[in-house]
């Protein structure tokens, strides 16, 4: 008898850079997180678009005080990624966003992350320090194209 393969509606919602199935219990940060969008440039139509997989970071002090996540910088020690596209972050003030749970064994396909190989759609390029920080927070592997 052939094994049964069952597809769930959640599988269609997973971003291409996420290697961990969404049905895994520790994919997102419980309760979500808030984002500090300072430094992002609005699109030509005024929207503040943030693509799925954008890297966010916190310092030790930010982590302790549960401050909003900021765009990843070399000074950060904790990193996460937003799970879904945010079409207009102007409408997300103090809204909890689905963020990938660090240190939970989640697999990330680094070659699909915006800003890793080339600049992201919002002009962000990840530094070597941020890439190394991601490697400490997630299991990074290269996906087949």
Image (cartoon, rainbow, N blue to C red):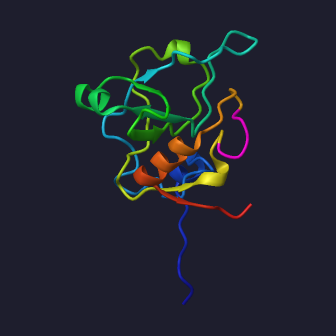
Tell me which residue sits at (44%, 36%) in the image: 98
Q: Quadrant of the N terminus?
A: bottom right
Q: Where on the picture, by quarter, is residue 46?
A: top right
Q: Image check: 141 left or right of 133? A: right
* Direction left: furthest residue: 64
Image location of residue 120, percent across then percent down: 69, 34
Image location of residue 117, percent across then percent down: 70, 46
Is 49 part of what is drawn in magenta? no
Q: Is residue 127 above or below residue 35?
A: below
Is 119 part of what is drawn in magenta? yes
Q: Image check: 54 left or right of 41? A: left
* Direction bottom: furthest residue: 1
Residues 120 and 99: in front is 120
Q: Is residue 89 above or below residue 79?
A: above
Q: Which residues are magenta?
A: 116-120
Task: Label the magenta part by its dominant secondary structure.
Answer: loop
Tell me which residue sits at (32%, 23%) in the image: 67
Residues 135 and 90: in front is 135
Image location of residue 145, percent across then percent down: 74, 60
Numbered label tally: 0
Image location of residue 102, percent across then percent down: 38, 47
């Amino acid at each position: 008898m052939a094994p049964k393969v069952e597809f769930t509606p959640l599988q269609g919602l997973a971003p291409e850079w996420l290697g961990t199935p969404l049905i895994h219990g520790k994919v997102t940060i419980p309760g979500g997180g808030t984002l500090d969008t300072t430094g992002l440039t609005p699109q030509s139509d005024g929207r503040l678009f943030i693509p799925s997989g954008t890297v966010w970071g916190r310092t030790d002090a930010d982590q302790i005080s549960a401050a909003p996540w900021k765009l990843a910088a070399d000074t950060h020690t904790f990193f996460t990624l937003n799970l879904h596209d945010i079409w207009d972050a102007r409408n997300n003030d103090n809204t909890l966003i689905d963020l990938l749970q660090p240190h939970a064994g989640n697999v990330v396909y680094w070659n699909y992350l915006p800003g890793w190989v080339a600049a992201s759609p919002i002009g962000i390029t990840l530094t070597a320090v941020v890439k190394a920080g991601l490697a400490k927070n997630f299991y990074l592997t290269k996906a087949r194209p």
